[in-house]
Image (spheres, grey):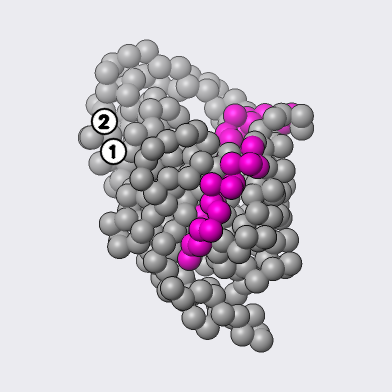
């Protein structure tokens, strides 16, 4: 097994990925990503916060640091951090318990990784929710940070903890900021609910009042891009940030109209007089320099509508 060997200029001279630990691999993204990574030839280990007899499984609970001992004597070529509590995604409460779990809990896990030399490479899955309301579009990796939710704040603090680990160890890290996701086995969210109600000719009420984020990438396209990134990223720097996205504006109203047309349901409409959201989408120009990207938002949405 080859590991990262950093040269004097901070670049990595030797890389070979064989085994990967997905922390939070039992969650929505983790369940789908693990399938793609396994198909690409990698040996995948997953973790969850509950006991399981599943093969290649570790119990890792950010609320119980004793659970980290399940990893004793383990070594991984890469650890991907997917685990995070989502209940605070619409909250601005600084006393929300998810904030503690997603930050302090994650910090104790990073310290365990460092102390036990579990890996030399970490990918931290972050979120577009770390960005401030945009001054210009699309939003790039170096644009202003300014979370408007407790969840976004927790992800940004997670980024800071990851960056601090890099500065105080021989571990390299990449931050991947993702938009909202739909598809696969997810049965919630604006896109799923809208398609399901309209295809089944059920009443539907939509409001964009105070809307900030919604799902703008299909799980399959995202997993393909993440797999490509993990397999081909060169680790030339000890720390980098990337947006992983379609790189195109996905307007809420335009998406609703597309679903309406594809389901041939002309009985439902949005009746509000004013849009309650600000345009927001991520740039994928940096990602394009690293891997081929998926950019067919409406093509994939059409497939999803037909399959549901």
Which of the 4 image quarters holds residue 165?
Answer: bottom right
**Disc 1 target residue:** 304
Residue sitting at the far bottom: 8
**Numbered disc 2: secondary structure:** loop
Q: Position of residue 181 (x, y in %)?
A: 44, 41
Judging by the rendered image, the residue that carries numbered circle 2 is 308
Above-or-below relation of 100 to 81: above
186 vs 6, nearest the viewer:
6
Is residue 75 shown in magenta?
A: yes
Q: Indicate whether 233 appears above or below 52.
A: below
Give the residue drawn at x 59%, y 41%. 67
Residue in front for this viewpoint, 52 or 108: 52
Q: Which residue is drawn at 47% across and 54% down?
A: 21
Residue at 65 percent of width and 42 percent of height:
65
Whether label 1 touches label 2, CB < 8 Å? yes
Residue 40 falls in image quadrant: bottom left
């Amino acid at each position: 097994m080859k590991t990262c060997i950093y040269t004097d200029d901070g670049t990595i001279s030797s890389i070979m990925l064989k085994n990967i630990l997905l922390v939070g691999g039992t969650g929505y993204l983790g369940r789908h990503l693990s399938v793609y990574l396994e198909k690409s030839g990698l040996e995948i280990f997953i973790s969850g916060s509950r006991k399981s007899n599943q093969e290649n499984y570790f119990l890792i609970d950010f609320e119980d640091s004793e659970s980290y001992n399940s990893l004793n004597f383990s070594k991984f070529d890469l650890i991907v951090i997917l685990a995070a509590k989502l209940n605070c995604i619409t909250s601005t409460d600084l006393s929300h318990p998810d904030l503690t779990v997603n930050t302090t809990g994650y910090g104790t896990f990073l310290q365990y990784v460092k102390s036990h030399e579990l890996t030399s490479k970490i990918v931290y899955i972050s979120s577009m929710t770390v960005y401030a309301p945009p001054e210009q579009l699309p939003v790039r990796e170096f644009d202003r940070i300014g979370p408007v939710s407790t969840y976004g704040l927790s992800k940004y603090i997670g980024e800071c903890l990851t960056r601090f680990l890099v500065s105080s160890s021989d571990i390299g890290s990449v931050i991947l900021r993702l938009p909202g996701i739909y598809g696969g086995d997810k049965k919630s969210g604006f896109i799923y609910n809208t398609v399901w109600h309209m295809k089944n000719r059920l009443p539907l009420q939509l409001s964009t009042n105070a809307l900030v984020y919604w799902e703008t990438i299909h799980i399959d396209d995202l997993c393909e891009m993440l797999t490509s990134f993990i397999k081909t990223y060169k680790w030339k720097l000890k720390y980098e940030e990337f947006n992983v996205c379609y790189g195109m504006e996905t307007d809420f109203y335009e998406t609703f109209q597309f679903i309406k047309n594809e389901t041939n349901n002309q009985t439902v409409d949005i009746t509000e007089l004013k849009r309650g959201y600000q345009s927001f989408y991520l740039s994928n120009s940096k990602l394009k320099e690293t891997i081929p990207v998926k950019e067919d938002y409406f093509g994939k949405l059409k497939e999803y509508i037909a399959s549901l």
